[in-house]
């Protein structure tokens, strides 16, 4: 069933480092009950871009029944140095949980969608959710709320220490901390869907999405990979690609976030463990 969508733009949801954070809200009209949430984060090399890039994907997810939030985060600058961008992702998750009733959100059914740099920070936020050590900082609004999410859809993400370190200008030690691939073998990551074009000169699918997909799968985690033959970076801008990838993302989220119990018989041990963790998060 496809829902009509209502959009509400430029809504301030928090403040970090003295800067307001805003999102655009896309609601499925006529959908009953609290809705699963998809938080979307744009690309742009951490230094540029804005949430207007997310309008088509957010509207598409809302038409599938999701409360879709196109999130603006602080761009990398002297006023918002790394890792402020990860703090903003975590802040958005906490605000959704704290304000679920007002938003009409199912607080235990939250997933992240990121594109390029936005996928990078989404993966890091998911991997270090509720950590007392990694990426702890910012104004910590609603610090009593969990940062855990049920799944991540990562479009053409940079994940290696070498690549991320070069792009962000980090030393070797900090680059490892900022590389999602370093977290792939742990148990903290929720299910991850990777989507990547095979003709991406900016962020090649190998060793990025392919390497992290392989590492998660080797450790028994839940993951999937969609490779798009001969397509470039930001291939989602090509005609028809938004609709196609929204279908992939919504199907993955339906399985792992919205209806994990329905699919539990088909899950492996690691996926089943994550489904149990997600159920516990929903009960918080």
Image: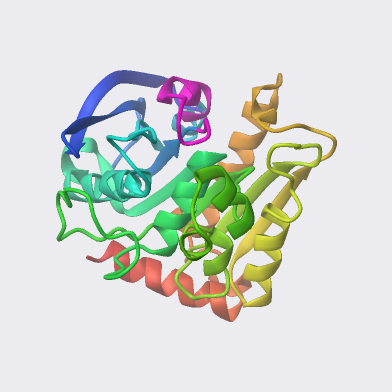
Left/right placement of residue 245 relative to residue 110 reads: right
**Is residue 9 depicted above or below 176 in this figure?**
above
In the rendered structure, the answer to whether residue 35 lies left or right of residue 16 reads right
What residue is at 60 percent from the left and 46 percent from the top? 157
Q: Which of 228/156 is in front?
A: 156
Query: Which quadrant, please, contains the C terminus?
Result: bottom left
Q: Is residue 115 magenta?
A: no
* Residue depicted at 63% across the width and 28% down the height: 243
Report the residue at 37% width, 50% height from top.
110
User: Height in image: 19 above or below 17?
Assistant: above
Q: Nearer the viewer, residue 185 or 136?
A: 136
Question: Could you say where residue 44 lies in the image, as x and y percent from the top left?
Answer: 52, 30
Q: What sort of colour scheme is used for the picture?
A: rainbow
- State the residue lying farthest toward the bottom: 269
Residue 118's spot in the image, x, y percent?
48, 40
Residue drawn at 37 percent across, 46 percent down: 82
Q: In this rendering, does residue 254 appear at all? A: yes
How many numbered marks does the figure carry? 0
Magenta-span inclusion, residue 45:
yes
Q: Does residue 115 appear in this view?
A: no
Find residue 199 and report its horizontal and vertical position in percent. Answer: 81, 37
Left or right of residue 16: residue 43: right
Q: Quadrant of residue 5?
A: top left
Determine the residue located farthest toward the right in the rendered image.
Answer: 230
**Viewer-proximal residue among 124 and 220:** 124
Residue 131: x and y, percent? 31, 68
Find the magenta span and give its range: 43-59
């Amino acid at each position: 069933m496809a829902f009509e969508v209502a959009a509400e733009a430029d809504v301030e949801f928090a403040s970090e480092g003295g800067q307001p954070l805003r999102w655009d809200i896309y609601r499925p009209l006529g959908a009953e009950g609290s809705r699963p949430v998809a938080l979307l984060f744009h690309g742009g090399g951490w230094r540029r871009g804005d949430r207007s890039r997310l309008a088509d994907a957010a509207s598409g997810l809302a038409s599938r029944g999701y409360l879709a939030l196109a999130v603006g985060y602080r761009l990398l600058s002297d006023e918002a140095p790394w890792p402020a961008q990860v703090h903003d992702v975590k802040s958005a998750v906490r605000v959704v949980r704290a304000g679920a009733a007002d938003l009409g959100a199912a607080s235990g059914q939250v997933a992240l969608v990121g594109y390029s740099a936005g996928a990078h920070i989404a993966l890091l936020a998911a991997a270090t959710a509720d950590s007392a050590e990694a990426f702890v900082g910012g104004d910590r609004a609603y610090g009593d709320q969990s940062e855990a999410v049920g799944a991540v859809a990562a479009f053409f993400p940079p994940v290696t220490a070498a690549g991320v370190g070069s792009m962000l200008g980090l030393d070797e030690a900090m680059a490892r901390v900022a590389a999602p691939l370093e977290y792939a073998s742990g148990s903290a990551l929720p299910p991850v869907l990777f989507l990547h074009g095979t003709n991406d000169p900016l962020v090649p699918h190998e060793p990025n999405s392919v390497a992290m997909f392989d590492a998660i799968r080797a450790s028994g985690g839940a993951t999937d990979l969609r490779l798009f033959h001969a397509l470039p970076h930001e291939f989602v801008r090509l005609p028809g690609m938004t609709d196609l990838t929204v279908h992939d993302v919504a199907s993955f989220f339906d399985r792992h976030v919205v209806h994990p119990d329905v699919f539990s018989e088909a899950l492996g041990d690691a996926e089943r463990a994550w489904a149990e963790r997600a159920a516990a998060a929903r009960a918080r």
